[in-house]
Amino acid sequence: QVQLVESGGGLVQAGGSLRLSCAASGRTISTYAMGWFRQDPGKEREFVGSILRSALSTYYADSVKGRFTISRDNAKNTVYLQMNSLKPEDTAVYYCAASRNLAAEFTTSRYDYWGQGTQVTVSS
């Protein structure tokens, strides 16, 4: 079992930055691909980005490409999501997830463990 806890969310003005952290416990995340998703009320949870075990490969949704960066520190058992140039449409609850699969995963069903989420609100 892997427990994931997100932190770092908050209220920020458009154009600002936030860094989300996802701290894992229970097992090392070095054997998991990690992903970030977000969800607005009334909408489906959508893929934001993912990073493979080796951290050599990252993938992003088109809506965040060039603005968001995923990184991981396996020694600290933590994954990060650096969010720059934030827009009001980035407002959502952000979730961290872990997948046992080797390949990059872009859908919620391919992830095995989830955090409880952290709210990000971007004001215009």
Image (cartoon, rainbow, N blue to C red):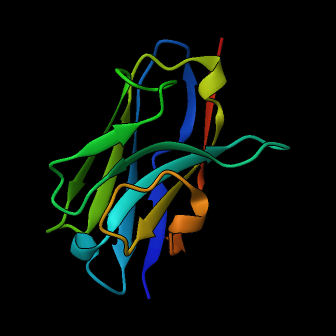
To which quarter of the image does residue 83 belong?
A: top left
Percent x, y for residue 23? 36, 66
Examine the rendered structure and indicate whether residue 38 appears above or below residue 107: above
- x 26%, y 57%: residue: 52
Residue 115 visible in this rendered orientation of the protein: no
To which quarter of the image does residue 54 belong?
A: bottom left
Q: Which quadrant does the C terminus fall into? A: top right
Compared across the picture, whether 18 is left or right of 72 comes to right
Residue 36 visible in this rendered orientation of the protein: yes
- x 23%, y 54%: residue: 72
Comparing 28 with 61, the one in front is: 61
Residue lying furthest right in this view? Answer: 42
Percent x, y for residue 70? 31, 43
Examine the rendered structure and indicate whether residue 43 appears above or below residue 74: above
- x 59%, y 60%: residue: 108
Percent x, y for residue 76? 20, 67
**Total tally of numbered discs in the picture:** 0
Comparing 31 with 102, the one in front is: 102
Residue lying furthest front in this view? Answer: 103
Q: Which quadrant does the N terminus fall into? A: bottom left
Comparing 77 with 12, the one in front is: 77
Examine the rendered structure and indicate whether residue 43 appears above or below residue 22: above
